[in-house]
Amino acid sequence: MTCSKSRKPGRWALVLSGGDGQRMQAFVQRWLGYPRPKQYCAFAGKRTMLEHTCRRALDLVPPERVVTVINRDHRRYLRLPRRLRLPGKILAQPERRDTAPGVFLPLTYALARDPQALVAIMPSDHFIHPRERFRELMEEAFALAERLPGQLVLLAATPDRAEPDYGWITPGTALSPGGPRLVRGFREKPPAAEAAALHAAGGLWNTMIVVARAQALWDLAHAHHPEMTERFAALRWWLGRPEEDEALELAYRGMPSVNFSRGLLTPAAGWSVALPMTGVHWSDWGRPERIVETLAEIGKTQTFPAACAASEKPAAALLPARSRLAAA
């Protein structure tokens, strides 16, 4: 259920659906018989991960303020084997340029329509449960971003193991007991020994769910990657016009590849706040074992044969990693 206060003017949801899911490709191929990025798959029930993400977005913003970014060659996944029901605007990247352009294309669209926009960056290939508790945390994140206009607010998962597959946040001073904490640093996919040290020191997992003023994100990117923001600034005027597709092609032609986590979040550590996701189960579902375990824990029936999830590696090498479902 969407509460009325969540529909404040200026709030936007930027849904990221441009990944190809390299680690899950073999599993999906065994299951479906053809490749399909995991965000376009329904691992339980009928909704895909992308549809679940958009549903969470609609708990926070009106449909016309949901902007989803995909890759151009993903368009077929929106139609087959059935048409996905997605709200708002869908933008298709003509080329792959890593994760930062995938954020700044929908951000450009939001800024063109609302220069004062508050945006939530929501990856579409993560599992999040329960939806109601997540909405409460996102409301808190939006409120923090309004109070701290120059800060990035990141939702952080509480680790239950030293997982080297994830990005890590080193938290600093708490702004309130048990609440948000200043960020001291980021570490993207560290070696196992470093992940163990981060876990022992109370590190948090970086979920890549960010809430911030759109202009704060733009200023951050322009300071570190002006060659990218200048291209999107030139594109802004053409959005919604007949020449939009041609302008988008030109913007991406020769655009440098920029990783959002390493290229933007890491240098923004001093201007970031981590909000621990207490009471929420989060996983990136980057391995079949995590999907199987998660669905068993919440009592959902998987839609794929169990044999498809069998790992080619020894089970001990792929122990599932997930966030702890902490008390709210």
Image (tube, rainbow, N blue to C red):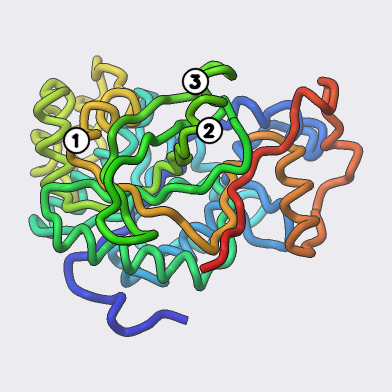
Name the residue carrying label 3. 190
Q: Circle 3 — which element?
A: loop
Ranked by sequence position, the earlier of labels 3 and 2 is 3
Asked whether 198 or 240 is in front, the reply is 198
Name the residue type under label 2: Ala
Name the residue type under label 3: Pro
Asked whether 325 or 26 is in front, the reply is 325
Question: x%, y% of residue 186?
Answer: 35, 30
Q: Residues within 10 Å of mark 2 (few under 14, many from 20)?
A: few
Identified at 59% across, 56% down, the residue is: 281
Q: Residue furthest right?
A: 307
Q: Which mark is residue 200?
A: 2
Identified at 75% across, 33% down, the residue is: 319
From the viewer's perspective, is 313 left or right of 76? right
Q: Badges 2 and 1: C-beta atoms under 8 Å apart?
A: no
Q: How far apart are marks 2 and 1 (CA)?
A: 22 Å
Q: Circle 2 — which element?
A: helix
Q: How crowded is mark 1: few (under 14 residues within 10 Å), some or many (20 or more)?
A: some
Question: x%, y% of residue 151?
Answer: 17, 47
From the viewer's perspective, is 183 left or right of 86? left
Q: Quadrant of residue 164?
A: top right
Question: x%, y% of residue 42?
Answer: 68, 53
Identified at 36% across, 54% down, the residue is: 275
Name the residue carrying label 1. 270
Residue 90 visible in this rendered orientation of the protein: no
Q: Which residue lies furthest to the bottom in this view?
A: 4
Asked whether 165 or 101 is in front, the reply is 165
Q: Circle 1 — which element?
A: helix
Name the residue type under label 1: Gly
From the viewer's perspective, is 293 left or right of 266? right
Q: How far apart are marks 3 and 2 (CA)?
A: 14 Å
Q: Examine the rendered structure and indicate whether residue 227 appears above or below residue 309.
A: above
